[in-house]
Amino acid sequence: MKKVKMTAAALAAVFAFAVTPVFDTAAADTTGIAGIHGISWSRPAYAQAEEAVDYTSSLRYLPLMTRTRYFVDKDEKGELMRSHWTGIEVFSVDYQGPRQPVETMANALDNYSAKENQSFDITHRKMLSDAKKDRSSRVAAGSTFFPAYQEDRNIFVHRSDFRVVSFLEDGYSYLGGVHGLGGIVGKSFDVYTGKELKLTDIVKDKNQLAEAIKQQLMSDYPKSSFAQGGGESMRNTVDQLIREDKMLWSLDPRGISFYFNPYLLGSYAEGIFTTTIFFSERPDLFVKNASSDIIEWRGPQAYCMEIRPYLNIRLSDSPRDERLYVGNDKDRIIIDYCGEKLEDFVTNKEIRPVLVSTFDGKKYLYVDYAQVTNNFRLRVYDLNGERPKFVGEYPLTRLTTSPQDSENRAWHIMSDPNEFYMTSTKDTDLLPRKQVTCRVGANGEPEVYEVKGANG
């Protein structure tokens, strides 16, 4: 990619401006915002620092991309099934650094995606056949109602650096019953070998880990059904999962997270339970480097982590009990941070949140959201005060394919707060639908310092 530096004045002319955040209270009423119309502009959405960018600071991060294929199966009688599948790959860039880990991880993810694609195709054919039989049975019984089957597989990347790539496989299936069933599975890979990591690669003693998980679950969910009676059923389940090596987990930048899908610890209505053990709070649990006595799998200090909506996650072991929940409905984006809720009133069809943690310890939330027209834009929130705060909306998105493409979607994965890739949206004044290179600015808003294909 040709590297072109642009001044702040040039970028201000090229791109639109940030939405002025008006509300610092618990609700951000932005229902009047539609694209760039009716907005009071106050400052540039993009800026260019005068100093040169130090690209060596990004060598610790591995740029990734996810690709999703969408399917609608139907015949003359109507829809039978809707489904989508997501693969993951290394994003090819002009990378200044060691090639071996990049190539190793690229091959590992290609192999992983190929196997998952094959598995999805087998499941897809079987479910489609079952859907046809189900509809025929309903028709024979005199029913005209048939809800289309559904099979969805998504990926949320928690970590992507030169040590570990770790992500969640998020699956959902509907087979014509009262409700569907969803769940998540974690995958973690050693970047230098391309091998999938086992729990025993990360922790010294699984029995001690089991005790730590049980203790943290009781602390995280004191009002859950499994906490009743001292949590005996939960404790037995955790012990069994550890003993049979069936624990679901992901390796995050600052610790290791564990996931318990519906019905495993509680009712369907209680959803997915998750908890995190941080390297800093239990360093005795984790494998250390023999020569340096540093925890072997600790991630970079600054990082970006995709957030799966509707999961209540721990962000740190600070006394404040940092937890983050991100959800949405059709007229708002809901953010609950440390028990303080922000309801950002904006019409949306879909959200893709990313937690951003900078070198100075500040935290922000980047949310790509789909408008009614299916176009995506970026909204940024500040998580550094007493309550989450809306920063602004920007004509950017991590989506790299056309928003109108109903069969394919590709997304850039943010991993490095100082260098990540986005696409300028079509409602910018100039250079619409261009790949841009960004970094997180001082107040959390994205700063663009490079535009692919720009001249001058």
Image (tube, rainbow, N blue to C red):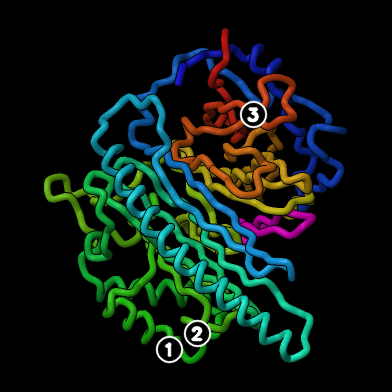
Q: Is residue 5 magenta?
A: no
Residue at the extreme front: 76
Question: Residue 213 placed where, x, y %?
Answer: 37, 72
Viewer-proximal residue, 455 or 60?
455
Question: Residue 363 placed where, x, y %?
Answer: 54, 44
How crowded pointer 1 is (Cα within 10 Å; few <14, some 14-19, many 20+) is rated as: some
Residue receiving disc 2: 226
**Which amino acid type corresponds to the residue marked 1 in the rendered image?**
Ser
How crowded pointer 2 is (Cα within 10 Å; few <14, some 14-19, many 20+) is rated as: many
Q: Main secondary structure of the magenta part?
A: strand
Viewer-proximal residue, 450 or 301?
450
Q: Is 287 located above or below residue 369 in the figure?
A: below
Residue that appears at 39% across and 45% down? 160
Residue receiving disc 1: 233
First-in-chain label (3 vs 2): 2
Q: Nearer the viewer, mark 1 or mark 3?
A: 3
First-in-chain label (1 vs 3): 1
Residue at the extreme top: 456
Residue at the extreme left: 291
**Which amino acid type corresponds to the residue marked 3 in the rendered image?**
Arg
Please state, as top left, top right, bottom left or bottom right, where the C terminus lies in the image: top right
Whether pointer 1 and pointer 2 mark residues with C-beta atoms closer than 8 Å, the reply is yes
Name the side, left or right, on which 86 lies relative to 427: left
Please state, as top left, top right, bottom left or bottom right, where the N terminus lies in the image: top left
Residue that appears at 55% across and 85% down? 225
Q: Which residues are magenta?
A: 325-342
Quarter-of-image position of residue 441: top right
Secondary structure of the residue carrying numbered label 1:
helix
**Which amino acid type corresponds to the residue marked 2 in the rendered image?**
Phe
